[in-house]
Image: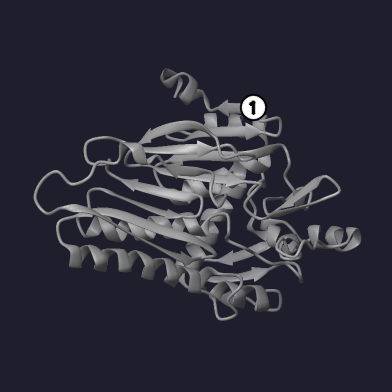
Amino acid sequence: MWVSFFIVSLIWIWPQCGFSEWYKRDEPIMGTRVFVELWHDDPAKAALLMQGVMDEMERINQLMSPYKTSSELARVNRDAATAPVQVSQELFDLVQKANHYSDLSGGAFDITFASVGHQFDYRNRRRPGQQEQATAAALIGYRSLKLDPVTRTLEFGKPGMRIDLGGIAKGYAVDQAVSGLLAAGVEHAIVTAGGDSRLIGDHRGRPWMLGIKHPRGEEHVITLPLSDSAISTSGDYERFFEEGGVRFHHIIDPAKGDSARELLSVTVLAEHSVDADALSTTLFVLGPQKGLKLVNSLAGVSAILIDRTGKVRYSTDLVDPTMH
């Protein structure tokens, strides 16, 4: 199960007038499945627009992937402990955005989690030893990441630190792709990258219907009618392995240097994907009580949390819309 929400096909409306119709395409980019579907009256232009989505996704992948040795992010991880590294304004701004969510959450969102996270190999079921993990966990701390807006440089305050934008970059990429579609006049579309989706308009007169799947089964928990919004889901089933009855997964609690385990999945609704993406990770780390407290304090943001017992919890506005 690669994502915990899906488009409910029963409400799709096929072309009813002229030559306009739905066009769709998907490709493997950013370590996940990137999908775009849009409504257009010109097949050639639709193809160009969809190619533009894929090109933008790949451009950001080349810039921000920690796995590509030629990326800016890889260069930062390689050199920033010895000297300030000058980066593009785009990368600098996204790191600042990430640090905003670190401040907002008291450090629950922290891109320096990678100091520990990179030592896990979920595919091959490998994790660091106890001492190795403790040593790496001591390097986590976004306040040790030095940003200079004048020189546009990043520097690590501790040797051995690493950063990873996996909790925010896909949402940012989705927003960038959507901006291109909006600039081209597209009025109905969806762009998805793994657990992050953003919707342009509605589905030709009706809302897009997205169903959230249960993280431990194929049955869906709730169906959401959406338009002109972003949705992001983070779950402990995306990259993980189990050992001795304990699930080790990729959402690291920076305070512990270990996987966060109070929740199974978090779905966040917001205006932009970059915010929904960062917040779904943030709430997952905070857990049900602190997570709901934070989301209930934010205007224009909703959340659905599934805790480790399988109980579904909702932000206040979804229970009583008059409260938000």
Q: Is residue 318 toward the left or the right of residue 258 in the image?
A: left
Residue in the picture at 73% in, 41% down: 261
The colour scheme applied to this rendered structure is one colour
Q: Quadrant of the C terminus?
A: top left
Residue in the picture at 80% in, 62% down: 136
Q: Is residue 78 toward the left or the right of residue 248 in the image?
A: left
- Against 300, residue 279 (above or below) is below
Residue 27 in the image: x percent, y percent?
Answer: 43, 65
- Against 222, residue 234 (above or below) is below
Element on which disc 1 rests: loop
Residue in the picture at 53% in, 49% down: 3
Image quadrant in which you'd find residue 98 = bottom right
Image quadrant in which you'd find residue 58 = bottom left
Outermost residue toward the right?
131
Residue 21 shows up from this direction: yes
Residue 169 in the image: x percent, y percent?
Answer: 51, 59
Outermost residue toward the left?
18
Residue 110 in the image: x percent, y percent?
Answer: 65, 53
Amino acid on which the number 1 mark rests in the picture: Lys
Residue 15 in the image: x percent, y percent?
Answer: 18, 47
Q: Is residue 206 toward the left or the right of residue 261 in the image?
A: left
- Against 179, residue 236 (above or below) is above
Residue in the picture at 71% in, 65% down: 118
Residue at which label 1 appears: 311
Identify which residue, 242 or 120, lies in the foreground: 242
Identify which residue, 206 or 172, lies in the foreground: 206
Label 1 CA crowd tier, 10 Å (few <14, some 14–19, many 20+): few
Outermost residue toward the bottom?
70
Residue 105 shows up from this direction: no
